Image: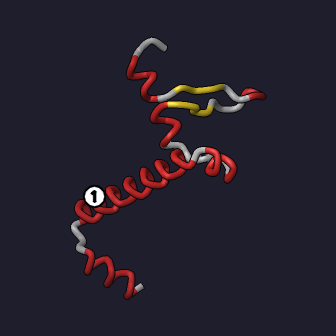
Amino acid sequence: PTNILVRILGKWQDTEGGGPSIPVGGIAYYISPPSSFAEIIYDPFHAVFYLIFILTACALFSKTWIEVSGASARDVAKQLRDN
């Protein structure tokens, strides 16, 4: 692709046997999970980036959920204790 935004988002490779395309570059590659333990050893930056991305996304989602629901941390802890 010639569009710079498309190239930043990712580069995709077709899999053998007509399976789904897999990201091999760009942002899509780094926010996709490593496919095996060997890939974690081969590309530790990808694994660490993915871990940080997932933890950050979960934290932001949790914070937003609490704010939208109107429940404080104390209210949530009370609900967990009572159930």
Colour approach in the figure: secondary structure
Q: Single out the residue that lies furthest toward the bottom.
A: 82
- Residue under the point 30% across and 61% down: 65
- Residue under the point 45% across and 35% down: 27
In the picture provided, is 32 more to the left or to the right than 9?
Answer: right
Indicate the position of residue 48 as horizontal and vertical percent values.
49, 52
- Residue under the point 60% across and 47% down: 34
Q: Which residue is denoted by mark 1 in the rendering?
A: 64
Indicate the position of residue 44 as horizontal and vertical percent values.
56, 49
Q: Quadrant of residue 9?
A: top left
Q: Is residue 65 above or below residue 9?
A: below
Q: Quadrant of residue 82?
A: bottom left
In the picture provided, is 16 more to the left or to the right than 58?
Answer: right
Q: Quadrant of residue 43?
A: top right
Q: Is residue 74 above or below residue 65?
A: below
Q: Is residue 47 above or below residue 75?
A: above
- Residue under the point 41% across and 15% down: 3
Q: Single out the residue that lies furthest toward the top.
A: 2
Indicate the position of residue 62 as horizontal and vertical percent values.
34, 62
In the picture provided, is 60 more to the left or to the right than 11?
Answer: left
Q: Give the quadrant of the C terminus.
A: bottom left
Name the residue nearer the viewer: 1 or 49. Answer: 49
How packed mark 1 is, by other alpha carbons closer than 10 Å (few <14, some 14-19, many 20 or more), is: few
The amino acid type found where label 1 is placed reads Thr
Q: Secondary structure at mark 1?
A: helix
- How many numbered marks appear? 1
